[in-house]
Image (cartoon, rainbow, N blue to C red):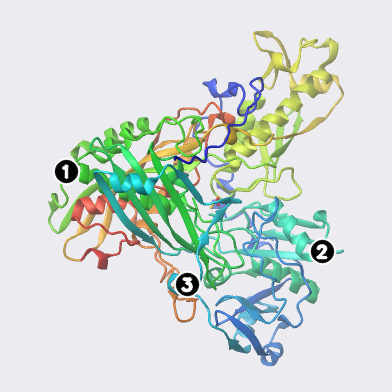
Amino acid sequence: AAQSVMKKAVELAPDSLLPGGRPDPLIRRQHGQIGRPVSRVDGPLKVRGAAPFAAEVALEGMVYAALAHSTIAKGRILTIDAGRAEAAPGVVLVMTHRNAPRLAPPPRFLSAAKAAAGDDVPVMQDDRVRWNGEPVALVLAETQEQADHARSLIRITYAEEPAATSLATAGAHEVGTFMGEPLSAKIGDAEAAFAAAPHKVDAVYRTPPHNHNALEPHAATLVWRDGALFVHDATQAVAHTAWSLARIFGLEEDQVHVSSPYVGGGFGGKTLWQHQILAAAAARLADRPVRIALSREGVYRVVGGRSPTEQRVALGADADGRLTAIIHRGVTPKTPHSAMPEPFILPTQSAYAAKTIALEVRTCDLDLVANTFMRAPGEAVGTVALECAMDELAEQLGLDPIELRLRNEPETDPVSGRPFSSRNLAVAYRLGAQRFGWDRRNPVPRSRREGEWLVGMGCATATYPYHRMPGGAARITLDAGGARIDVAAHEMGMGTATAQAQIAADRLGLPLEAVTVRYGDSSLPGVILAGGSQQTASVGLSVMMAHRELVGELLKLAGNDSPLAGLGAEEVESADAGLRKLDDPGRFESYASILGRAGRGELVVEGSAPMPLETMHWSMHSHGAMFCEARVNAVTGETRVSRFLGSFDCGRIVNPKTAASQFRGGIIMGLGLALMEETQVDGRTGRIMNRTLADYHLPVHLDVPEIDVIWTDIPDPHTPMGARGIGEIGITGTGAAVANAVYNATGRRVRDFPITLDKLL
Ligand code: MOS
């Protein structure tokens, strides 16, 4: 009997402006700020070097921190000889588990609403060692060089214990969970349907661990004042970090202030790790402000990345190419102190209209640095396996890979049963195929050669869900000259401040120049993570809600002498720096006039976003059709991506300029995933060996062709502004598009990523 995991759709009130209710009227607006390719408002400061990042803030009397890392994977510290370090020039303090202040364990990410820590290991609280590279001592000195030198003088002996450091040596496997939900789904009897299918593909795909390599390594500059902690951090979660540090140090939430206005990239790894906690503890012991700036190697030791995966994908299809079974299951490790098994089945849940589906992620514990979120966790590597398998099936069926996908487009979400809020993948494929020249692809592998180079084309589907987390809030301060938006959001280079200025300007009927956005500070309203590609929706809706408050307050202030007298909030809109009646533009009064007549210099309102019920009612996902042309050298096996196109369906695009950069950045990260990125762990010691950018290969300019990006721009009627997230989708589908192009070029199907040249010879 068919088992179903369908969940009942939540009923939503149809009468509200909120997502799930009436579509946002701004979606239909043709000439507003939304959709304009505005240049980054934070750009000039950054290119002039005038934007101080966390490791550039100078505090009076500041000392510098250096970490010593364990050299074993598991065991106990027997002795620490810090005498020479303590006597070295400039040294202020050597902190180890013997003198570190007693701290509460870090609240692990997702374990509470505002928990921000990558792991819940009690930081320097005992003699235990849990991974190779765990901080075991911290040195403070008057200069960074003195701290680094003194750190090298510390001698530590250990009692080593057997450690599990690879999938082969891991213990029991159990079903993983993600965001509190088990990572499994079952529709019908997929194994039986697969066994009976006339056409089938059954293959195992492997992806390696990946490390975070944001341009700006993790850093914090911090100080204690009157029992309160002030942190200049590099984080994508200011409010979460403040709350979590307060828990760790036994403080009230408002005794921790986290400021992070400028962040040099964050892809899921710029959260709370041991370095901020240790620096704060040492600052308290030494009674000095502290700067801790992790070296590139330091990031590899302290900050976790994406865990490796082994994924079996088995697809069964009938003679028409209609899927009768999708099986996607496999294993990925985590650590005892983190809860983030790479959830690679996520993209498969809503991908295709198969009659039977069986999905499962099993996980096991390894003694390594805690794995964590990394751009499109799940989808980035899940689409590698699923979309390569679809390519393999298409070839077996003699079908064009795009046609195979279109034949299996689902009407409703195949696992949840919910309707899609908006799904135009077929449009994205049509537009993309036309622009890329897909009709010039020869389906016969190894059929196009130019000199030494074998040339091929491949495609794959990209997908990432729409999310909106609870906790959105924003404050508007309106005066005669314009408005300021205050929100605890993050600008990590993706264009947050610019997009939100556009949204607010449209909402308030102000020119863009009259709107400023303040962000990146835990004292501002909202608990808004820059993650899950959801910040724009979260902040945008918060601004919309604050604007509703503003209209109500303005109408009250306007009173009976205004042309707006007697009108309710639903009868007016913001336009031309004032309010006007919806169908009678003659009834208008400017903000300046309303404020002036009421004798008010400014008006301050705050609005909160409602709970994100829309995702319980609809299946909400962005999609893309990814096209790759790859050239593989027949002599050396070297792969060069010569052309790439991403054709996206992500709802309304708020800012085409910043969006294009997000798409391209994601695709570049996907090219790395496809061809070069791989964290190499020594299986004997659990130590990460390639911990520099010389050894851990990322795409550089010469590896990246001109990347073409286009989009449908079809608004999603059920999201704020009609927009869905765009920050992560670019990395999804890219790995498979490259692998499929390499197969078309060479006839070699590489299922073990990255596709390095040795695998093609
Ligand atoms: Mo992203 S992995 O949600 O920063």
The answer for how far apart the CA atoms under marks 3 and 1 are is: 41 Å
What amino acid type is highlighted by mark number 1? Asn
For numbered disc 2, what is the local secondary structure? loop
User: Disc 1 vs disc 2: Cβ atoms closer than 8 Å?
Assistant: no
What amino acid type is highlighted by mark number 2? Gly
Q: Which mark is residue 250?
A: 2
The quadrant in which the C terminus is found is bottom left
Relative to residue 579, is residue 379 depicted above or below? below
Question: Which is more foreground, mark 3 or mark 2?
Answer: 2
User: Disc 3 vs disc 1: Cβ atoms closer than 8 Å?
Assistant: no
Name the residue: 53% across, 26% down: 717
The verdict on label 2 being within 8 Å of ligand 1 is no
The answer to which quarter of the image holds residue 33 is top right
Camera-nearest residue between 733 and 405: 405
Relative to residue 476, is residue 385 depicted above or below? below
The answer for how far apart the CA atoms under marks 3 and 2 are is: 34 Å
What amino acid type is highlighted by mark number 3? Arg
Provide the residue designation for mark 3: 691
User: Disc 3 vs disc 2: Cβ atoms closer than 8 Å?
Assistant: no
Q: With 46 as the anchor, is 238 left or right in this view? A: right
Where in the figure is residue 618, as x and y percent of width and height? 54, 32
Camera-nearest residue between 64 and 134: 134
Q: Which mark is residue 442?
A: 1
Where in the figure is residue 415, as x and y percent of width and height? 47, 39
The quadrant in which the N terminus is found is top left
Q: Is residue 661 visible?
A: no
Name the residue: 76% across, 11% down: 567
Name the residue: 84% across, 14% down: 559
Name the residue: 62% across, 31% down: 10
